[in-house]
Amino acid sequence: MATQVSERSDACDLRYKFDFSDPAVRANPFPYYESLLQSPPLMVQRQIPWALVSRYDDCVAVLRDHQCYSSVNPMLPGTEVYDAFNQIPVMTFVDEPVHARLRRVAAPSLAVRRMENMAPVFLKLVDDILDEHWQGRREIDAVRFLAHEVPTYAFGHLLGIPKSENEIIRVLGVGRANDGEFHFHDPRFMESRADFIRHLVQTRKGQRGGEDLISLAIAAHEAHEKIDDLELFGMVMVLVTGGIGTTADLISGALYQMLRRPELAAAIKRDHALVAPLLEETLRYDGPIHTLFRATTCEVEIAGLHIPARTPVCVVIGAANRDPRKFANPDEFDITRDNSDHIGFGEGIHFCVGAAPARVEARVALQRVLQRFPRVRIADGWTPEYNGNAFGRGLATLPLILD
Ligand code: HEM
């Protein structure tokens, strides 16, 4: 079967230029999405041929078919940017049956009810952050002093790590200490991250009966699930690195989407229950994760496109969430729409296992900010800039005026 790699590099056709690891694309991916959504899946030539899948139904079909579309990175040329965990086995990047075994260890401790019960604890953590950084100030960067802090504190709590060590969690989660020293791609950072997690796991192994995520994972391991030491290490790593930056990007993104629309902001300030639909619409409209990685295990056909085995597939969920076939007027930000089918948390067996903590943390944080700082608004003259990687993006800063 012929591979349909087009030789086109038509300057006007943005489909062939889409690459989310390119900061210029990441800065404004939406014109690319519009172009991608006009056609079925296509092959593009990077170092090797890639399939790009963008329409809502096509993305869902790929994500549900985990047999033909593997989550294991085959480390083909150019796919290294998607190897977020340096080949350590983590549930995101393994297939069945290993995936199900790993997921069973973490899922119960992150379940919706458990997280909803933790809302008062998260609220207290948010209050501590607001007391420490916001109270008495006129202007504040909500990325650094709220969005990064809330999931950092929350994870410290979930992992049973004392507040005095939050700096380490922050570095693990957002790749940068508050003094801006470390960075994700810095080998010193990777090494210190590994050391810290090894130490954590080792310490918890000597204790019994803990309710934190690591103790629960160890207990499951010892009871029946049998995850080995490297997998346990990977588990902590994927939860922290997968859960903090993304939640931070949701918090800052939702604040931005609300505050840039004065009428919407006024409505939500009057009724804090609207924060929940605000978060869902943010996840659809411009969520933290825009692309997912898969590789074909066999020759497949999707919407008329033949893809050979061992081909990388970029699943552009950021585009799917703007597909007009699924969401009417998709470029309109509308918290009253039915967006319950958005795929900002993915779809299928790899659907985000941390959706509940992310939703509860973000909801509690935004509601508390509106309660305590009802006049909050975006500082004049600011324009958004984004940090990110091959998977997603989030605001670099969000300066707010509080008085
Ligand atoms: C707003 C915040 C978040 C967003 C937008 C998000 C997004 C996603 C997406 C799109 C996937 C699917 C990946 C795939 O199919 O390849 C995913 C999976 C995953 N997420 Fe999240 N996530 C968020 C928060 C969290 C949190 C708080 C945690 C940890 C507590 C977490 C841990 C994970 C893990 C471990 C997986 C892999 C699940 C599996 O393979 O079964 N995420 N996430």
Image: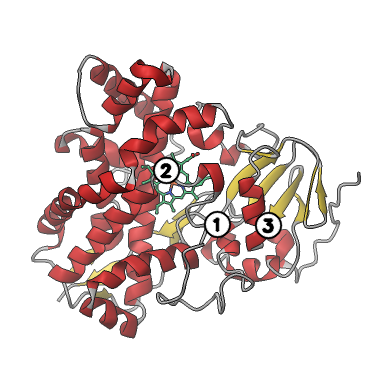
Query: Mark 2, mark 1: which one is toward the viewer?
Result: 2
* Contact between labelled residues 3 and 2, with CB atoms less than 8 Å apart: no
Q: Left of 346 or right of it: where is 272?
A: left
Q: Is residue 6 above or below residue 373?
A: above
Query: Which of the labelled discs sits on residue 298, or is there none?
Result: none
Q: Earlier in the sequence, mark 2 or mark 1?
A: 1
Residue occupied by mark 1 = 23
The residue at 60%/63% (across/down) is 319
Q: CA distance from mark 3 to mark 1?
A: 26 Å
The answer, for residue 202, to whether it is visible in the render is: yes
Q: Amino acid at mark 1?
A: Pro
Element class at badge 3: helix
Query: Mark 3, mark 1: which one is toward the viewer?
Result: 3
Query: Which of the labelled discs sits on residue 58, or is there none?
Result: 3
Residue occupied by mark 2 = 353
Q: Residues within 10 Å of mark 3 (few under 14, many from 20)?
A: some
The residue at 57%/57% (across/down) is 317
Q: Amino acid at mark 2?
A: Val
- Is the residue indicated by label 2 positioned so its CB lies within 8 Å of ligand 1? yes
- Is the residue indicated by label 3 positioned so its CB lies within 8 Å of ligand 1? no
Q: Position of residue 384 (x, y in %)?
A: 41, 68
Q: Left of 248 or right of it: where is 136?
A: left
Q: Amino acid at mark 3?
A: Asp
